[in-house]
Image (cartoon, rainbow, N blue to C red):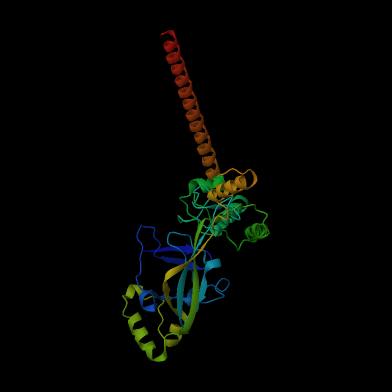
Amino acid sequence: MTLSQPFNRYGNCFTFNSGRDDKEWVTTRSGSSYGLKVTLNLETAEYLGLFGNKAGARVSIHPVNSTPFPETDGVDVPPGMATSISVRSLVITRTPIPYGGGDCTANVDDTVSLFEGNKYSFRLCENSCFQCQIMQNCSCTTHMIDLSKVEAIRKCNDRFQGTPVPICDLANPRVQACVRSQWKQFESGELNCSCSQACRDEAYELSISSALWPSRPFEPYILRNLHMIQPLKRRNLPRTSEEVRDNLVRVEVYYEELNYQSISEEWNYKEEDFLSDLGGLLGLYIGISFITLCEIIDFILDMIKLLMKKCFVLRMKLNSRKFKQVVEESKATE
């Protein structure tokens, strides 16, 4: 349930409950006692001076089977602290053109997305577009892309068809200038990425609190538990109280409530509203409605019945007169 992959800016990235193996962890209760609790060893002694200007971890809360982007969606958690992150779910539903304010899409296009994940998002599309431009112009990427997206990679640069795409060497002034140029175009909207919003977005509202961790009386227990680990895994573990506070991070993630807030776009003018208004206008301006039409048909049928009745009466009178004439003529001849 946990995936590990390198991330060019934040080092190793670990994903819990990724959903890649068609299994998902679920919880039936809310509160800090029923969430995820993780203790991380930062190994700050291995930080590089240029890239290690901050000590800590980056946590990104995202939907299952989606692509995380911690540089924009994440929160920093510092060492020597226990950080609690309570989560509330938010679902946003949009309507496509012509009913919504703009078009939306629901599916991930494998010929466009360069990242793992089966859920489309606006940020996924934009980051894929940006990486594609870097591949075209700088022949490298600044993110770890999904090499199984062969068609998407081929569209960006035929040179990397069937071969790994290298990570950009930002220590090289030429590569750094190329990436910076593409970033400026991306920020100014010159890349023409044409990304649509997702028709269904899942987001999370976070409430963050922190406390000093571990406490002074608890530090000996932490050190004892750490050095009970097998010798092969004991490398770079803290050995003193100062190293514990400089390297260990405690993170707790849990649901604040087991419900979610829904924001939905709805059609302001539907087909049935149009038919209803059309019927009302016809009844107002032309004087025709369904009831009036039925009354006209009923009137016509009544007129036909009346005419047929009159014709029958007239015919009976004529036959009666003819019969009387015949009787009178027969009496006269006698």
The correct choice, above or below, for 206 with respect to 239 in the image is above
Image quadrant containing the N terminus = bottom left
The correct choice, above or below, for 185 with respect to 49 in the image is above
For residue 140, say whether it is visible: no
- In the picture, measured across the screen, residue 269 lies left or right of residue 17, that is right
Q: Residue at x 54, y 57 (%)?
A: 266
Residue found at the very far bottom of the displayed protein: 217
Of residue 102 and residue 178, the one placed in the foreground of this image is 102
Of residue 142 and residue 32, the one placed in the foreground of this image is 32
Of residue 104 and residue 178, the one placed in the foreground of this image is 104
Residue found at the very far top of the displayed protein: 333
Residue 23 location (% of width, % of height): 34, 60
Residue 251 location (% of width, % of height): 43, 76
For residue 315, say whether it is visible: yes
- In the picture, measured across the screen, residue 13 lies left or right of residue 289, that is left
The number of discs equals 0
- In the picture, measured across the screen, residue 76 lies left or right of residue 250, that is right
Q: Residue at x 53, y 67 (%)?
A: 73
Residue 126 location (% of width, % of height): 58, 56
Residue 49 location (% of width, % of height): 56, 74
Image quadrant containing the C terminus = top left
Q: Quadrant of residue 5?
A: bottom left
Of residue 316 and residue 310, the one placed in the foreground of this image is 316
Q: Quadrant of residue 327?
A: top left
Q: Residue at x 60, y 54 (%)?
A: 102
